[in-house]
Amino acid sequence: MDVLSEALASMRTGAPNSVRTDGRAPWAMRLPPTVGAGFHVVLHGTCWFYPTADRAQAIALGPGDVVFVRDGAGHVLADHPDTTPEIPRPEQFVQRPPVGVLRIGGDGPPASLLCGNYHLDGQRRHPLLRQLPAVIHLPARHGKHPELAAAVQLLGAELDNPRIGSHGIVPALIDSLLLYILRAWIEDQPQAEATGWAAALRDPAVAPALAAMHDDPAAAWTVQSLADHAGLSRAAFARKFNAMVGEPPLAYLTRWRLTTAARLLREDDLPIEKVATRAGYSSEFAFGKAFKREYGLAPGQYRRQARAAA
């Protein structure tokens, strides 16, 4: 079981939005806070990124660079930190499949970026996402993260020259980009220094236990049976898991079961009794009580609200 993919899928609430930004100096755009996580990929040229309230933290970006904004916090993209930013106006957007296009600025040197937003459930964020830095900058480096670099190159090619199939290819690449970004960040952490989920997903003891829970959340797991997967004693496993993941093994299992149930309620038409079984509950009553305690709604109410909001 791919724990990273499953964790992200559990938070997704819709397809990503994306806009290609074509700027010519002088240009600067201020992007307000959004729900979910955001990203920017520099396709051509150079620019700067900085948090809205702190120009001193400006980061210089070049071709192939990627910036990931964990919580969709407000920020600025500009040809130079000294350029006064503005909120993009509706008339600057040009709609063109497979993504919209924003044209901004004057007649100076050009830069092109792909900017997007992933819709993630901010109320039920997986601890993996909570532990990420607020901003991740992945500079393009020759030979480093070739899959991420290839995805960026493919995106650039499709956006520069849309052809038959581009309407389906670009959203799929943008979807994959999130996994490539997080994989690259995790692999960039020196294994000897990594902590939290960056360490847990590569740890020879904790990673198999996480995979087992994700693969079969309904199984009657105990700390001992998970420790057996980890190849550690019960006490050693519990200490290590808690230190890396941030909560005891069975607490994580309970929350993952309810997260799995919430995803099934949003995306599947299974009867609630079947959802309860898939989530590891022996009765619909016990499941409903646990679900309401966690989500504040009965399973049926949650499903109706989620479907109405989709």
Image (cartoon, helix red, strand yellow):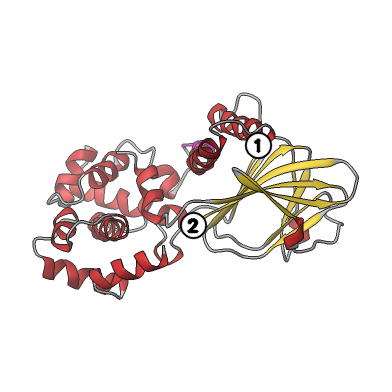
From the image, tell me which residue sits under label 2.
119
Image spot of residue 113 (x, y percent):
70, 44
Q: Residue at x 54, y 42 (%)?
A: 174
Q: Is residue 261 above or below residue 181?
A: below
Kindly check if marks 2 and 1 are in contact, taking CB atoms under 8 A apart as contact.
no
User: Would residue 203 be found to the left or right of residue 264 on screen?
Assistant: right
Q: Residue at x 38, y 68 (%)?
A: 308
The residue under label 2 is which amino acid type? His
In the current view of this chain or complex, which residue is farthest to the top?
A: 143
Image: magenta residue range:
187-191
Is there any visible trace of residue 233 in the rendered image? no
| Of residues 310 and 216, the one drawn nearer to the viewer in this rendering | 310
Q: Residue at x 41, y 67 (%)?
A: 309
Circle 2 or circle 1, nearest the eye: 1
Q: Is residue 297 above or below residue 283?
A: below
| Of residues 146 and 162, the one drawn nearer to the viewer in this rendering | 162
The residue under label 1 is which amino acid type? Leu
User: Would residue 279 be found to the left or right of residue 56 on screen?
Assistant: left
Q: Quadrant of the N terminus?
A: top left
| Of residues 131 and 121, the one drawn nearer to the viewer in this rendering | 121
Which callout, 2 or 1, points at the residue further toward the start of the chain? 2
Image spot of residue 193 (x, y percent):
49, 42
Q: Secondary structure at mark 2?
A: loop
From the image, tell me which residue sits under label 1.
159
For residue 246, what is the image quadrant? bottom left
Image spot of residue 73 (x, y percent):
61, 62
